[in-house]
Amino acid sequence: MRKKKLRLAVFISGTGRTLKNFIDLIERKKLSAEIPVVISSLPNVSGLQYAEEEGAMDIEIVERSKFDNLRDFSEANFEICRRYGVHYVVLAGYLRFLEIPKDFENRVLNIHPSLIPSFCGRGYYGNIVHAKAIEHGVKLSGCTVHFVDQDYDSGPIIVQRAVEVKDDDTPDSLNQRVFEAECLAYPEAIELLAEGRVTVHGRRVRIAPPEIDEFDM
Ligand code: GRF
């Protein structure tokens, strides 16, 4: 199967470090993707500067407070994604709960800064996750890329990367090292999808071995 160039909608709520990583990798031809639209849950977040600088991305702001209920809010977001014909929605530091419509099942990805199912779920975001990991005394933390289902941080897991927790770690220092792992894990998951190697079987995601190009042999 030939590698596909995936059309991604990237959802942000804040600093947009993840979006920036995708933009850099796409520019360096290290990620088989394009980002026609960035959706922010808030206006004026600093992450939008990356989309503006890049130039070719449309920006949409969809605020939860403008909608009476979760369904209408979610629908407004996914309607934009349908309009742009995206293959996948990539949550990148996005802090709003979404109801996933049928046609986007297993097409919405998130990255969480711990090894799920530890230190995740409602209320676990930002440095809270790292503070809890340090407080608990785990020796390994890391990050998890997963499909988004109808609960917090609970969908099928695509990629995980472990990061050592050091004796003198603070939430900030651990955050920084986990984020370095995220910059590898998220693109890795997207590449696997672009290569058509990911299948979902209940809670389990299977990754098919890479196809060997007969002309390379
Ligand atoms: C990271 O902690 C990631 O795990 C979580 O959001 C943070 C990145 O946000 N999903 P941003 O890309 O810096 O806005």
Image (cartoon, rainbow, N blue to C red):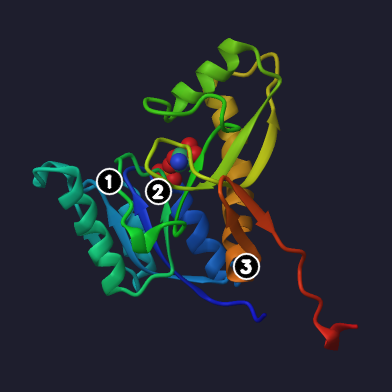
| Residue at 67% across, 41% down | 161
What's the distance in space between the residues labelled 3 and 1, CA to CA?
Answer: 27 Å
| Residue at 51% across, 70% down | 33
The x, y position of residue 90, in whole percent, is 43, 55
Q: What amino acid does circle 1 point to?
A: Val
CB atoms of marks 1 and 2 within 8 Å = yes
- Few, some or many residues within 10 Å of mark 3 (<14, 14–19, 20+): few
Count of picture labels: 3
Q: Where 6 falls versus 66 (above or below)?
A: below
Q: Secondary structure at mark 3?
A: loop
The x, y position of residue 108, in whole percent, is 43, 55
Q: What amino acid does circle 3 point to?
A: Lys
| Residue at 46% across, 25% down | 127
Q: What amino acid does circle 2 point to?
A: Gly
| Residue at 33% across, 52% down | 100
In this rendered view, identify the residue nearer to me: 34 or 99: 99
Does the beta carbon at disc 3 come under 8 Å from ligand 1?
Answer: no
Badge 1 is on which residue?
45
Residue 30 - label: 3
Which tag, 2 or 3, sits closer to the chain's start? 2
Q: Secondary structure at mark 2?
A: loop
Residue 100 - label: none
Q: Where 169 falls versus 162 (above or below)?
A: above
Badge 2 is on which residue?
16
The x, y position of residue 1, in whole percent, is 67, 80
- Few, some or many residues within 10 Å of mark 2 (<14, 14–19, 20+): many
Which residue is at the far right?
A: 217
Instruction: Name the image quarter holding residue 141.
Output: top right
Does the beta carbon at disc 2 come under 8 Å from ligand 1?
Answer: yes
